[in-house]
Amino acid sequence: MKKEILKLRGVKVHFPVQAGVFNRVVGHVLAVDGVDLDIFRGEVLGLAGESGCGKTTLGKAILRLVEPTDGEVKYISQDDDETELTSLEKKDMDPFRKKLQIVFQDPHSSLNPSFTIFGSLQDPLKKFGIKSKEERRKIIGDLLEAVNMRREYMDRYPHEFSGGQRQRIGIVRALCLEPELIVCDEAVSALDVSIQAQVLKLLMQLKKEKNLTYLFITHDLSVTEYLCDRIAVMYLGRIVELCDSEDLYNNTLHPYSEALISAIPVADLDKQTKRIVLEGDVPSPVNPPKGCPFHPRCPKATDICKTEVPTLKKYSTNGNEHYASCHLIDLPEIS
Amino acid sequence: MEDKNNIALSVRDLKTFFYTNNRCNKAVNGVSFDVEKGKTLCIVGESGCGKSVTAATIMQLLPTLSRIEEGEIKFQKDNKIINIEKLEKNGKEMREIRGSDIAMIFQDPMTALNPVYTVGFQISENLKYHTNLNKKEIREKCISLLNDMGIPLPEKRVDEYPHSYSGGMRQRAMIAMAMACNPKILIADEPTTALDVTIQAQIFELMDKLKKENDTAIILITHDMGVVAELADNVAVMYMGNIVEAGTADDVLRRPTHPYTKALLESVPVLGRGKNQDINPIKGSTPDPYNRPIGCQFAPRCNWQTESCDVMPEITQINETHQVRCHKYEQFFEKYK
């Protein structure tokens, strides 16, 4: 039986746009605009989409690194206790910070250059009650070895490491409090291909050993296919398709996912397909189009798409649950 | 290669070194390739392998601490052969070639455009120096170029500043700038790395069209094997300043004979192969350019390393188009045939 670890209901993050002498609020960037999502224990959930679609903001909103404007984020512990995270006081949030961790995108800017690795990594351990220095050194040393780095590296400074090594240090930081869920925000995007594969393998191995759940945020659909159990595709702050990773490639329902998949260059001469080229750019999230947010670029758009906003409906492909939000899907809806 | 007249640019044994702090970085260390008219040559490699420096060398856009040490860059212009490496960097002849005969698209459209001039002005600069058109004609040409690139309302957009363009539109404006004088060679240095896949698809369509319509030779620099599979006619794989394998896209992608090419292809997940595909990371990381391995540069990371790899392997011609720089290529090829 699959058990949820996080339940998101109607999560919205709106950033005010200010202008003029008095910084009046003239509008809102609808970065995340109503997301419902369940994350199950032990799965890898991919969150894919183009830049500006709100995937990073959603990841941060889960950890309350940005405050959601509206909606609920519920954490369900192993003993089925539900806690609503968004209404907690800052200090009551602490025990949950231990369970939810994040690996940031850019390994060059996410480590403080004036501290040694140990100096940076010991802070969370100190905060969560590991008083003796020897013990902290032992924990960090063990984890460094777990990510194939040498124990002695903890006394070096970030500039002494390459990009791939720094990203592994970022993973150690996320791991040192023994979290249950790690949000990987474009964790491999800044790395060279040969290094990317090393980090991907490492993430998979750690997941098995430590029973982790990942929310894997990326724009690269070939990586999500390899790594993820389920994939959510986002467009302009909303989830447009959510299904098993294999179904996303074999039984694509939403025209946006279809275009996205066809646009990815495939490193295999036998698998070349016709690109579906979308017109124009992603519309501004300050002023999203009326109706389906994708309709101005959609090759299949009809009149109904221009007026009515589609909701995320449940379908079934290959016997699996498959959610999509499009008016033009020909499958029977499941309740 | 076959027909001499088909070759737009020919590079032989090019060496470009950087000198800093009394140390020498052999960024490009003996590179040879030909670019054919109307064909795309993809140069693939990881960061730091010298692919961008090769491009900068051809354009003579190298920084002051570096110089072309050896080699030839032969460019065919009006049935005359010009040796680019002998021209003065800012001399009249080089300035005539740069921008008109050989044009370049840079990696980051956000920083490559000047924010204080309108896009139209920046495109027309090229036309002003390289053609005899008058002001009005230049403006018309600018508008038609933007139109060709698929920018909506070009009459209005031509007077706008780069900040009001989106990333994809800026890159298209960059391509318009590069294509203004119908160059014979277009060098694109990671033109889509900073862009989203849907915008990348738009740019690729455009480059394909240019190649077919104008017979432009394209040198495309990338790190993405997927891009290579989609666009390339010929491929050169670079590692630490050398071309380790070169040939047609078919040769290199279907029958890789260098362990590095094979490893690169195996290290990326391929879309459509599902969850059970096996990806194999390359062990270690690229060596420090100031502290290079002796002999074959890839040897410390290679599973096929033997004692003979302490000597730099020579280029071996496997067939007419396919060449490789490896001691063990025969055994390697046998195993993976």
Image: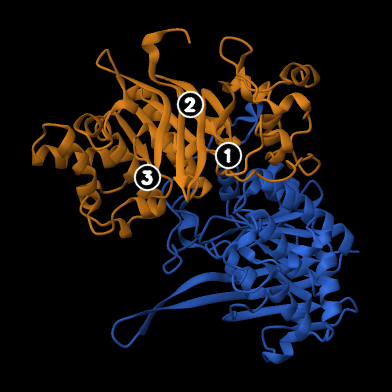
Question: Percent position (x, y) of residue A222?
Answer: 66, 45
Where is residue A167 shown, x and y percent of the image?
Answer: 67, 59
Q: In the depicted view, which residue is nearer to us: B329 or A101?
A: B329
Chain name for mark 2: B
Circle 2/circle 1 CB separation < 8 Å: no
| Badge 1 element | loop
Q: Nearer the viewer, mark 3 or mark 2?
A: 3
Q: Nearer the viewer, residue A210 or B101?
A: B101
Earlier residue among tags 3 and 2: 2
Q: Residue furthest front?
A: B22
Name the subunit of mark 1. Answer: B
Viewer-side residue, B197 vs A230: B197
Residue with the mark numbered 3 = B63
Chain ID at mark 3: B
Q: Secondary structure at mark 2?
A: strand
Marker disc for residue B224: 1
Instruction: For residue B150, say whether it is visible.
Output: no
Instruction: Give the residue drawn at x 28%, y 54%.
Output: B114
Whichever of labels 1 and 3 marks the residue nearer the N terminus, that label is: 3
Residue at (26%, 38%) from the top-left corner? B145
**On the image, numbered disc 2 is attached to which residue?**
B41
Label 2 sits on what residue type? Leu
State the separation of the CA atoms marked 2 and 1. Answer: 14 Å
Residue type pointed to by label 1 = Asp
